[in-house]
């Protein structure tokens, strides 16, 4: 294959990768906005399933569930969840020689948080009255769940394996449970958070698709050829954009 043909093939691959991420990302963000608009149109009242789930968890008194939910409250938000853990994960990606992956993760986190705050102030939904933790303004969408969904989606984009899907889904579901057990959110808030978190991560991934694809090829080359060989300038032609 000639150099021009190889560059054209790479460009086509990057465009296809961006489209695969962009379309579902837009759909998920749009669904979160539609759900929020539906809630607002109803006067921000809880859905029947919201009230049922909230009452069910109110009646279920469990020290174990309460302790777990408080742990998730700290792990998914505040200084630990918003700053310490994301920076630690970004540093880990840098140690793995994945600078573009680290940049993608940080930007995805920022984009997700910004989207959540925008929707919170746009819809202004009240939290359940029996909330037992201190939280910021706006119940819809859940920022904790959005953050969990962003991390899960980033993990899948960077490491598309079955285990990342299972672990990511479990993390999001457990975070959603903890937020509703603490009565910090209605059940529909957690759905909105999962949609915006996943959608934001996919949209940022689409913007980073070119560098991420090149970086992934470099990682594969290092595994196959070895670090010293893959870093040889004579080998870089196969990784050129």
Image (cartoon, rainbow, N blue to C red):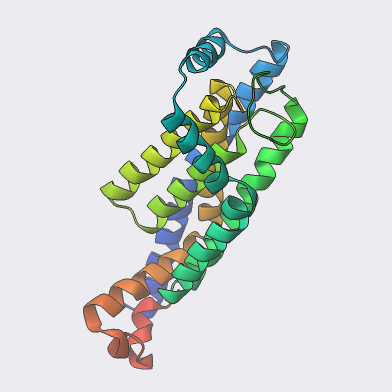
Q: What x and y, as percent, mark residue 72?
A: 50, 41
128 displayed left or right of 137: left
Corner quadrant of residue 1: bottom left
Corner quadrant of residue 138: top right
Compared with residue 59, is residue 187 higher up or lower down, i.e. above or below? Answer: below
Identify which residue, 15 or 91, lies in the foreground: 91
Residue at 41%, 41% in the rendered image: 171
Say if residue 142 shows up in the picture. Answer: yes
Compared with residue 136, is residue 226 higher up or lower down, i.e. above or below? Answer: below
Residue at 55%, 7% in the rendered image: 48
Residue at 37%, 68% in the rendered image: 216
Identify which residue, 9 or 205, lies in the foreground: 205
Quadrant occupied by the C terminus: bottom left
Q: What x and y, as percent, mark residue 163?
A: 28, 48
100 displayed left or right of 157: right
**Residue located farthest toward the front when viewing the structure as drawn:** 63
Q: How many marks?
A: 0
Q: What x and y, as percent, mark residue 182?
A: 56, 28
**Residue located farthest toward the top when viewing the structure as drawn:** 48
Compared with residue 76, is residue 219 higher up or lower down, i.e. above or below? Answer: below
Q: What x and y, as percent, mark residue 112?
A: 61, 46
Compared with residue 119, is residue 130 higher up or lower down, i.e. above or below? Answer: above
Residue at 48%, 65% in the rendered image: 101
Say if residue 97 shows up in the picture. Answer: no
């Amino acid at each position: 294959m000639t150099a021009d043909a190889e560059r054209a093939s790479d460009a086509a691959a990057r465009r296809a990768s961006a489209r695969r991420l962009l379309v579902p990302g837009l759909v998920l963000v749009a669904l979160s906005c539609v759900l929020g608009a539906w809630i607002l149109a109803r006067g921000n009242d809880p859905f029947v399933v919201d009230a049922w789930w909230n009452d069910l968890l109110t009646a279920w008194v469990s020290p174990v569930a309460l302790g777990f939910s408080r742990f998730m409250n700290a792990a998914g938000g505040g200084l630990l969840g918003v700053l310490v853990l994301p920076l630690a994960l970004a540093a880990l990606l840098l140690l793995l020689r994945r600078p573009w992956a680290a940049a993608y993760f940080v930007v995805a986190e920022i984009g997700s948080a910004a989207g959540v705050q925008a929707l919170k102030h746009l819809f202004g939904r009240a939290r359940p009255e029996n909330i037992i933790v201190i939280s910021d303004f706006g119940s819809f969408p859940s920022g904790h769940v959005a953050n969990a969904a962003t991390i899960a989606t980033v993990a899948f984009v960077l490491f598309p394996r079955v285990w990342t899907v299972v672990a990511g889904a479990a993390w999001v579901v457990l975070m959603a449970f903890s937020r509703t057990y603490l009565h910090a959110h209605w059940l529909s808030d957690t759905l909105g958070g999962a949609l915006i978190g996943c959608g934001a991560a996919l949209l940022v991934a689409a913007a980073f698709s070119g560098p991420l694809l090149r970086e992934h090829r470099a990682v594969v080359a290092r595994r196959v050829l070895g670090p010293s060989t893959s870093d040889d300038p004579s080998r870089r032609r196969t990784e050129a954009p």
